[in-house]
Image (cartoon, grey):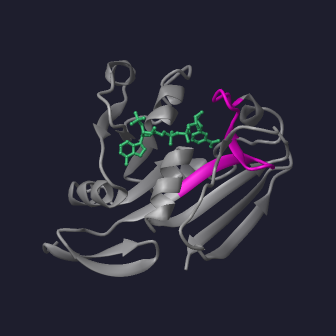
Amino acid sequence: MSDIAVATVGGRDMKQENQAVSECSVFVGVSLDGFIARPNGDLDWLMGDGGGDSAEYGYDEFIAGIDAIVMGRKTFEKVVMFDKWYYGNKRVVVLSHHSLDLAGARARGGVVEQMQGSPVEIVSKLALSGAGRLYVDGGLTIQEFLRAGLIRRLVISRLPVLIGEGIPLFGSLAHDIHLSHIATRTYPGGMVQSEYEAI
Ligand SMILES: NC(=O)c1ccc[n+]([C@@H]2O[C@H](COP(=O)([O-])OP(=O)(O)OC[C@H]3O[C@@H](n4cnc5c(N)ncnc54)[C@H](OP(=O)(O)O)[C@@H]3O)[C@@H](O)[C@H]2O)c1
């Protein structure tokens, strides 16, 4: 690929030097009232009734089409405490402004590295290292990438539960982001999964 390549940014094609093709996607579970976790980070409501098997609700297929997962430090701190490392040997890039201890995740087989910078810098760096298809995860992180116009695809699985307060999926924006609705699927437990693409 030449040094000047086409970068797909938020659905728009932009020519930028030293940038390869990138596509950022979100795949996230939310409560009906729009939270991705309780205020203390608990995900018990997500694991309970209403959800489904990951293969059934498309997660396995989604992750198979991803080169790397870009997650916020707070999400990393949560997933590293799970009973096992759920990302296999998929490249995981943890964002933080501070030095992180990644040894625990690596000891469990995780292919983990740390990065910081603006979303555009991170996406460009990853694209040049061969990771163009990115899964962006974590509330603040998703919001930051959305504000930067970098999210191309959103798959939002809404669970039939109100949790009242928590960590929100979405936040403030400088301007509206218009999306095109691709599909909505419903599941026996009551989960409703909608897929959108940036216009
Ligand atoms: N329901 C779901 O599907 C789902 C999915 C993902 C996460 N979650 C939950 O959401 C919670 C975490 O979300 P959150 O919104 O609190 O935080 P987050 O997005 O996971 O992490 C935010 C942190 O990431 C770092 N960061 C973000 N962008 C950065 C950048 N450009 N450069 C350097 N560092 C950057 C900063 O870490 P520093 O402060 O260290 O600099 C920031 O404080 C957890 O409880 C997790 O379990 C739920």
Residue 45 position (above or below residue 142): above
How far from the left and from the top, in percent, is residue 150?
43, 65
How far from the left and from the top, in percent, is residue 104?
37, 18
Q: Residue drawn 53% across and 68% down?
A: 174
Q: Nearer the viewer, residue 139 or 109?
A: 139
Q: For the image shown, how many numbered marks are present on the structure?
A: 0
Name the outermost residue toward the left: 3
Per the rendered image, the range of residues in magenta is: 26-43
Using the rendered view, name the quadrant where residue 82 is placed.
top right
Q: Quadrant of the N terminus?
A: bottom left
* Left or right side of 145 for 196: right
Residue 92 position (above or below residue 103): below
Q: Nearer the viewer, residue 41 or 104?
A: 41
* Left or right side of 195 for 165: right
Q: Residue drawn 81% across and 38% down?
A: 163
Q: Quadrant of the C terminus?
A: bottom right
How far from the left and from the top, in percent, is residue 119?
36, 56
How far from the left and from the top, in percent, is residue 95?
37, 41
Using the rendered view, name the quadrant where residue 2 is placed.
bottom left
Instruction: Please say whether residue 129 is one of the residues in the magenta stretch.
Output: no
Q: Residue drawn 62% across and 59% down?
A: 155
